[in-house]
Amino acid sequence: MIAHRVLLAAGILAAVMLGSLPAIAADWKPFTQAEFSAAQKDGKPILVDIFAPWCPTCRAQKPILEELTAKPEFKDLVVLVVDFDHQTDDVRALKAQQQSTLIVYKGAEEIVRTVGETNPGNIEALLKSAL
């Protein structure tokens, strides 16, 4: 019995180290038009997070988003992060007026967007709308 548990634990550890277990959290990536287009083409649920490092609202949103997107229910969500100050062409293309903008897509269709939202329940509902 003990040998079986040791082998099972070793197998799980090896799988984790080799990355062969299924994803249990959302996939966070820097925003690029190529990543965005690929996720849209694949019909994936997408969250575009437009942030600025100096923005207090963005800093309040980040731990909420990290906690929520770590939940297994959001494992298929693609989170694309746009730097408001340095990716101005992307910000304009997304028609965002300011930082702390969260935009949810289901494939190519924009479902909802919000600016300045920091209520965890509202943000969770926003993310669920993409699923």
Image (tube, grey):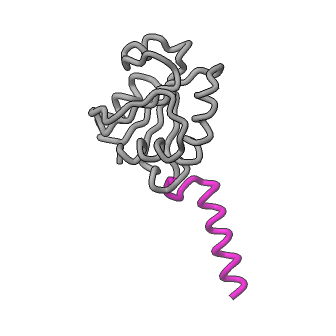
In x, y percent, where is residue 54?
Answer: 65, 19
Q: Quadrant of residue 35?
A: top left
Q: Is the magenta stretch mostly helix, strand or loop?
A: helix
State the image coordinates of residue 77 (x, y, percent, origin top left): 43, 44
Pinpoint residue 36: horizontal percent, then vertical percent.
38, 29
Establish if 76 lies above or below 84: below
Q: How many labels does the image show?
A: 0
Q: Is residue 34 magenta?
A: no
The boundaries of the magenta stretch are: 1-24
Residue located at (30% from left, 37% from top):
107
Q: In this view, does 128 lie above or below 111?
A: below
Q: Which residue is drawn at 72% across and 85% down?
A: 2
- Taking the image as shown, residue 127 lies to the left or right of residue 42, namely right
Determine the residue positioned at 39% across, 25% down. 34
Residue 98 at x, y percent in the picture? 48, 17
In the rendered image, the vertical position of residue 7 relative to residue 32, given as above or below: below
- Quarter in which the N terminus is drawn: bottom right
In this picture, residue 12 sits left or right of residue 46: right
